[in-house]
Amino acid sequence: MADQSAEELLLDVRVAEASKLYKFYLNNEKKILGTAGVVTFLVVWELVGNTLQLINPMFMSAPSLIFNAAVQMFGSGEIYNDLYVSGLELFWGYFLSAVVAVPFGIMVGWYKRASYIFDPFINAMNATPRVALLPLVIIWLGIGILSKVGIIFLGAVFPILINTRDGVKTTPYNLLTAARSFGASEWMLFKTVVLPSTIPFILTGLRLGLGRAIVGVMVGELYAATAGIGFMITVAGATFQTDKVFVGVLIFALTGMIGMELLTRVERRFDKWRPQVGAQAQG
């Protein structure tokens, strides 16, 4: 903390003594360097993939070609049904995983006996690759949207559940003891101590679960799908349309980036609620 304060003070001194242009750079260094890195990468990629054609476009596209493909796909409307199908699958799979994982994780984290019973199954399922379960999910739920929702659910539910469970278990024991000493009921204890302590962990789990859910969309649509961005990527890859493949990949990447950023901003608002030291709660 002291080192950080010294660095901030040094930065303030440098900013005060610098010229206006240098001040602007110092205050926006992260954005400037990040933007410069991205622009440099895109320029080099464009030169290699299109202008100089050092790589066969069949195997590697270029930013301008990807942009033209995206304009054509959105202009003709051919991509909208795929976006709708993938969006519907992602929404329901992620929503159901959160609805199931949060209360179940709280229960397992709060009640020791529930933890003893369910922890082996939770840990085993979390360690099992979801791809290995895909044939079973298709057998049980068919080849429609339900099977994709199922694989997305399986991908997202365990990060959310485990983070919620661990958040409850790390509730500061001294706060629980203090609340009980004042005669707080179990409901008051949960509402005023356990839940505020667990919320940052739940948000972390939701952020991790979103990444797994997006992977689940792609994995689910690789098998027995007739629509969706993953299906579009598969068809484009099979016909060597690398520009369309990159359009689909960028859609997944942007979806993940935007979702992660939104959840990260929400998570930061609850950072002060995150306990530094915790102990196993009792129920």
Image (cartoon, grey):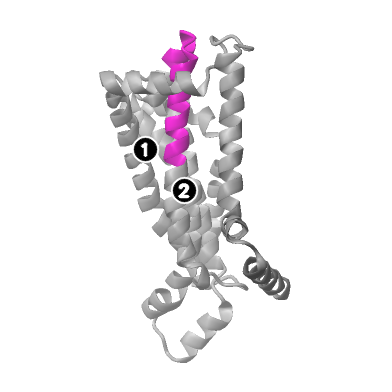
Q: Compared with residue 270, is residue 260 higher up or lower down, i.e. above or below? A: above
Locate residue 61, reporting x and y percent: 53, 17
Q: Position of residue 191 (x, y in %)?
A: 38, 75
Q: Is residue 87 above or below residue 222?
A: below
* Quadrant hosting residue 4: bottom right
Asked if residue 248 lies in the magenta stretch, the reply is yes
Crowding at mark 1 (Cα within 10 Å: few <14, some 14-19, many 20+): many
Task: Identify the residue under disc 1.
Answer: 90
- Tell me the kind of residue under disc 1: Leu
Callout 2 environment at 10 Å: few (<14), some (14 to 19), or many (20+)? Answer: some
Residue situated in front as seen by the camera: 30 or 161: 30
Q: Secondary structure at mark 1?
A: helix
Give the magenta range: 234-256
Identify the residue at image location x=28%, y=30%: 84
Q: Secondary structure at mark 2?
A: helix
Give the vertical position of 179 relative to 196 (above or below): below
Q: How many marks?
A: 2
Residue 73: image location, x then y, percent: 33, 20
From the image, give the main secondary structure of the stretch colored magenta. helix
Q: Is residue 275 visible?
A: yes
Location of mark 2 (residue): 260
Q: Residue at x 33, y 35 (%)?
A: 87
> Which disc, if any, is residue 173?
none
C-alpha distance separating marks 1 and 2: 14 Å
Q: Residue at 55% of width from left, 67% of height from top? A: 169
Is the residue 2 above or below the residue 57 in the image?
below
Q: Is residue 100 left or right of residue 246?
A: left
Nearer to me, 247 or 135: 247
